[in-house]
Amino acid sequence: MNRKCRHIISSGEPKRAIYVDEENMQEIMAYIDQDERHKKKFRHITDIILSGLRNSSLYDKEDINERCKDVTAMKFFKGQENDRIYCKEVHSTSDTLVVVAAVLHCRKKSTRLSKKEISLIEKVGGYTYEV
């Protein structure tokens, strides 16, 4: 399914950028902007992504099956609200790694993935973005 996305922030080296899905942009940005705690956590996660660092407790692949290829999750407040923003990683024509924040999922309830979460992750895996 072809979808549109909008640029938020990028880095120079390594070439990386954060975009947000246009259809879910209002919901995702409202979640991030709701208070300073959410803004700070989002900035922290995006700094890690843009720097090319790995921190699987904040940002990691959701590698369940072939339909979930290139789907990742920004993990907010593990052990508390346990919210997620499911993302799709794509490469642009200029060889930039683009992370598209696609879908907000609030209050993940367990360490295992529920059928609803698997369905949501597979749905994001089916999205295609032109950057």
Image (tube, rainbow, N blue to C red):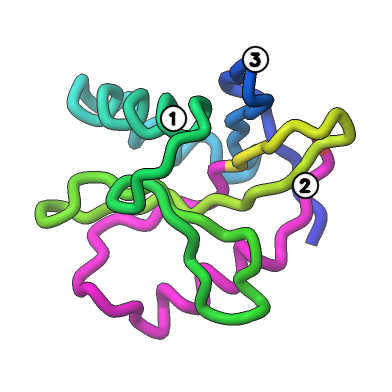
Q: What kind of residue is marked 1?
A: Thr
Q: Which contiguous range is marked in magenta?
A: 101-130
Check residue 124 in the rendering and tell me which mark sits there, or answer none. none
| Disc nearest the viewer among 3 and 1 | 3
Element carrying mark 2: strand
Of marks 3 and 1, which one's residue comes earlier in the chain? 3
| Percent position of residue 30, x then y | 38, 31
Examine the image and state in which quarter residue 71 appears: bottom right
Evaluate if marks 3 and 2 touch, with contact meaning CB atoms under 8 Å apart: no
Q: Residue at x 34, y 36 (%)?
A: 31
Q: What kind of residue is marked 3?
A: Gly
Whether 120 is among the magenta residues is yes
Residue 2's place in the image compared with 26, above or below, is below
Q: Which residue is mark 3?
A: 12
Q: Which residue is mark 2?
A: 129
Q: Residue at x 57, y 19 (%)?
A: 9
Position of residue 39 in the picture relative to residue 122 (left or right): left
Element carrying mark 1: helix
**Quarter holding the N terminus?**
bottom right
Q: Residue at x 66, y 76 (%)?
A: 67
Examine the image and state in which quarter residue 7 appears: top right
Disc 2 from disc 1: Cα separation: 19 Å
Element carrying mark 3: loop
Q: Which residue is mark 1?
A: 46
Q: What kind of residue is marked 2?
A: Tyr
